Image (cartoon, rainbow, N blue to C red):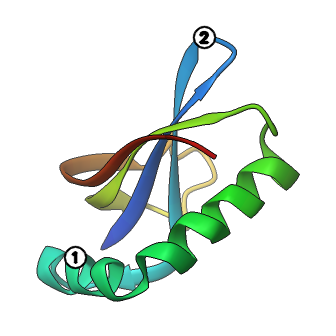
Amino acid sequence: MKWAIVFYAMLGINGEVKEHISWGITFNHHENCISFFEQNKNKIVAGLKSFTENNVDPNAKLLELGCAHASVDFDDPNQPEPDVTMKMMLWNGEHI
């Protein structure tokens, strides 16, 4: 079982809310995630915009962005979606 503090995003897509998490950058503590976000907010939001337009839906609305505790067993092919808890919202409410 692997766990880390990760970025999560809640996206509004065609009237549905979908959660996406990123394992690309991980942290040991929420405080490190928050500090990184504060120092790189514009780049993170721009990167999320690019990812969403190219991989999800160009009409998506970013509802919420923050740090959360995520755990998953990458060695188990039957593992369901990661368990995401302890969300700390850092940003919300803008079209991307």
Picture quadrant where residue 48 is located: bottom right
Is 48 left, or right, of 51 in this rendering? left
Above or below, 70 against 96 in this view is below
- Tell me where residue 56 appears, x and y as whole percent: 78, 42
Q: Which residue is mark 2?
A: 15
Is 93 left, or right, of 76 in this rendering? left
Tell me whether circle 1 and circle 2 mark residues in contact (CB < 8 Å): no
What label does residue 7 carry, if any? none
Q: Nearer the viewer, residue 94 or 6?
A: 94
- Tell me where residue 33 appears, x and y as whole percent: 27, 79
- Looking at marks 1 and 2 on the same chain, the residue that comes earlier in the sequence is marked by 2
Above or below, 84 against 1 in this view is above
For the residue labelled by badge 1, is the local secondary structure a helix, a strand or a loop?
helix
Is 16 left, or right, of 6 in this rendering? right
**Marks 1 and 2, Cα distance to the nearest angstrom?**
29 Å
Instruction: Assess disc 2: are there few (<14), some (14-19) or many (≥20) residues with their C-alpha within 10 Å of its C-alpha.
Output: few
Q: Nearer the viewer, residue 94 or 69?
A: 94
Residue type marked 1: Ile
Residue positioned 76% across, 31% down in the render: 59
For the residue labelled by badge 2, is the local secondary structure a helix, a strand or a loop?
loop
Residue positioned 21% across, 48% down in the render: 85
Q: Nearer the viewer, residue 60 or 85?
A: 60
Work out which quarter of the rendered image holds the N terminus and state it: bottom left
Residue type marked 2: Gly
- Tell me where residue 89 appears, x and y as whole percent: 23, 51
Above or below, 3 against 77 in this view is below
- Tell me where residue 47 appears, x and y as whole percent: 65, 70
Above or below, 20 against 6 in this view is above
Q: Which residue is mark 1?
A: 34
- Residue 2 visible, this orientation: no
